[in-house]
Image (cartoon, helix red, strand yellow):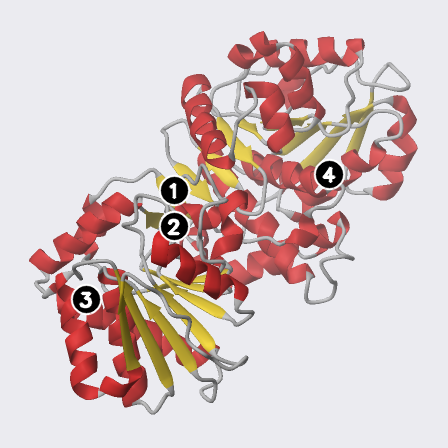
Amino acid sequence: MKFFTTSQIRQLDQYTIEQEPIDSIDLMERAANAIYERYLQTFDYRFPVCIIAGPGNNGGDALALARIMQKNSYHVNVVLIHAGKLSTDCEINKQRLMDQFPASLEVYENKFIAPNIAVETIIIDGLFGSGLTRPLSGIFAKAVKWMNESGNKILSIDIPSGLQGEENTDLTVPIVKADYTFSFQFPKLAFLLPESAAFAGNWEVLVIGIHPNAISETESKFNYLQESEIKQLIKIRPKFSHKGTYGHLLIVAGCKGMAGASVLAAKAALRSGVGLVTVHGPKCNRVIMQTAVNESIFISDKNKNCITEVQNLNNYSSLAVGPGIGTSPETVKMVEHLLLNWTKPCIIDADGLNIIAQLKTLLDKIPAGSILTPHPKEFERLFGVCKNSYERIQKASEMAVKYKLILILKGAHTLIAQPDGQLFFNSTGNSGMATAGAGDVLTGILGSLLSQGYTPENAAKLGVYLHGLAGDLALNEQSEESLIAEDIILNTGRAFKEIKRY
């Protein structure tokens, strides 16, 4: 799903108003009805409601919602605060509410008086939407402070009041700390970034009928991966295929004490559909590998404890290098030699990235279309420290374009930065996957998909989504605390089935 900056969203709204055509007040009514329908499914109807509305169109949405809820016998208390003129549509919805339910509305100009509410009351935040361009102050800051300190559940309309849609350089300013956010038509980038995501709480996207031509014709580099799109990427396996059809993956992994990285990557690759897997590792890992992964081939390095030389590269469809290899001088030379002699896209992870961070000239030697999978610290070693996640996203995009690589920046909403400038955020995965070996599993999945003939771009999107979904399915039997990397591998088949069933 393509999504947009807050300034673009205003343009999409205007396009819809002009081309559907629909009056802006009717588009607001449509949005309010969408919130109401989702509210019914989320909260107990017996809970009273307190709506805090502001002077703009977000306040207009809130006032329209208040009227709809009262028509449906909800007990609603509405507080409208402003410091001057209301927007046209907010004024219309204020008058509609006063005409039908005058006793429910309290209007305060240049002051905020906190309403007296019960502990079970749901607060609906309709102060300001995504059009806000400066920090809240005065009466609006007081309203935010009251909401945050109330102890009540808070639902924000479209975006928590005070939160910027993209970059938030100062999170100490007044911002509503919502438990739920119902966002119109698209997520906001701020919901996907670790510093600002907590303010949105559990967020959902509500479709309000933005004109499809506006969405298709408006360019955006931001995308949110969803199951419907991922399903289209999966290749059909022909009846008369054989193991050679699905490629031969070489995994260069492991050093003394790190055989587990090789095991996890190899198992994940095999569970993801590759025809053959060969693991090249130090001699000390041979027995472990051939015992733990019967289906793999193991090639012993001449060195007992680390990897020093990889030969016969022409035998393989794809290459994954890095998990657990260490950074010994001999292994550094091996990686240098490998990048000079491997010409196809490959997967580089973990210590492979750390070695490149030591020798940044190697960035220019990586084959175009290769997939690098850093976590934030590895990313900083490669490309420098960033002051926040927003800056890191911008830098990831720049580096992907500059070096013609695919960068997978691992995290809660793993980012895929492509060489064409497009950015994809993942929608699957959970905090239980913050565990040793989960990255090795992703490396195996990605290498497997490359071997099977997926383009690097599609391998990245499918691999990241599949990895996260397998982790989500693992929670059916595990908890976030108990989940381990092996659980992700064991649920990879279920993840494939889930996607195909969509």
Decide if residue 208 is in sight here. no
Circle 2: residue type: Lys
In the picture, the disc for residue 188 is: 2
- How far apart marks 2 and 1 lie (CA) works out to 7 Å
- How far apart marks 3 and 4 lie (CA) works out to 59 Å
**Residue toward you, 47 or 483:** 47
**Residue toward you, 26 or 342:** 26
Query: Picture coordinates of residue 428 (x, y %)?
Result: 54, 53
Circle 4: residue type: Ala
Sooner in the amino-acid sequence: mark 2 or mark 3: 3
- How far apart marks 2 and 3 lie (CA) works out to 23 Å
Sooner in the amino-acid sequence: mark 1 or mark 3: 3
- How far apart marks 1 and 3 lie (CA) works out to 25 Å
In the picture, the disc for residue 266 is: 4
Q: Are marks 2 and 1 in contact (CB under 8 Å)?
A: yes
Decide if residue 286 is in sight here. yes
- Residue at the disc numbered 1: 166
Res. 204 image quadrant = bottom left
Query: Picture coordinates of residue 303 (x, y %)?
Result: 87, 15
- How far apart marks 1 and 4 lie (CA) works out to 39 Å
Query: Picture coordinates of residue 349 (x, y %)?
Result: 65, 28
Say few, some or many: other residues with alpha carbon within 10 Å of mark 1 (under 14 / 14 to 19 / 20 or more).
some
